[in-house]
Image: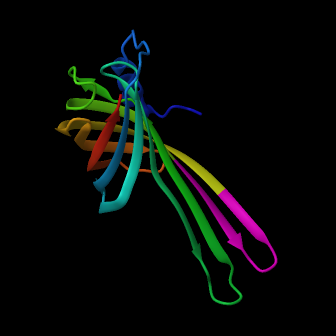
Amino acid sequence: MRLPLRAVPFAFALCAALPLRAHAQPGQIEIRIDALSYERATGRSSLDVRVPGAAAIAWYLNDQVALESRLIGLRRTTSDAAPGFPSVTTTTLTAALFAPVHFGTTRGRSGVFVAPGVVVNSARISTDASVTTSSTSTTNVNYGLDLGLKHTLQGRVSLRHALTYRTGDDLPDTYGVTSGISVFFR
């Protein structure tokens, strides 16, 4: 896989953000639900209010750096056509890996952060005719950067707001905002 030229700034930000001494210690875990997101790309905008929301889990390597995996969406749709036409089933999985770097000493519970990352979209389309079945699969890699702020609500619970930027294989330059709530363990 070739790294596209537009991904170079994200790769550089990821490498620059990780400290030279990212030693593991008894780690903190953060579980987050992003319930609100807004995205704007050329010619389109979307507002998502999700219940329960997109899920993320972060493992803290030290006081300021975490590795965060996100399950953004799993969707399966089937369209039944008129008699004599094939039905089409589409299964889409979107997941991501980000590396949030927090500026401050609150172990990610409050303050400013920057998070470079990679978003992978995988889709499988199956066509089922009465005699034959065919399917195609595609996987696209997109890159992202979140810049945000966390506020401690109470003890182990924080509110997270982030400005987002996404670009890549199947995505035009997309800007947005997300908000969610986090719970910390340890």
Q: Is residue 124 left or right of residue 75?
A: right
- The reply to whether residue 87 is in sight is yes
**Residue 10 location, x and y as percent?**
38, 30
Which quadrant of the structure image shows residue 128? bottom right
Q: Is residue 140 left or right of residue 64?
A: right
**Residue 101 location, x and y as percent?**
31, 25
Which quadrant of the structure image shows residue 28? top left
Residue lying at the far top in this picture: please name it: 21
Above/below status of 55 relative to 126: above
Can you say which quadrant of the picture contains the C terminus?
Answer: top left
Residue drawn at point x = 35 percent, y = 25 percent: 13
Is 123 a magenta residue?
yes
Residue drawn at point x = 42 percent, y = 12 percent: 23
Of residue 87 and residue 4, the one placed in the foreground of this image is: 87
Q: Main secondary structure of the magenta part?
A: strand
Of residue 109 and residue 145, the one placed in the foreground of this image is: 109
Is 33 a magenta residue?
no
Can you say which quadrant of the picture contains the N terminus?
Answer: top right
Residue lying at the far bottom in this picture: please name it: 83
**Residue 160 location, x and y as percent?**
24, 42
Of residue 136 and residue 73, the one placed in the foreground of this image is: 73
Above/below status of 43 relative to 145: below
The magenta span reads 121-136
Please name the colour scheme applied to the rendered image.
rainbow
- The reply to whether residue 6 is in sight is no
Q: Is residue 104 left or right of residue 79?
A: left
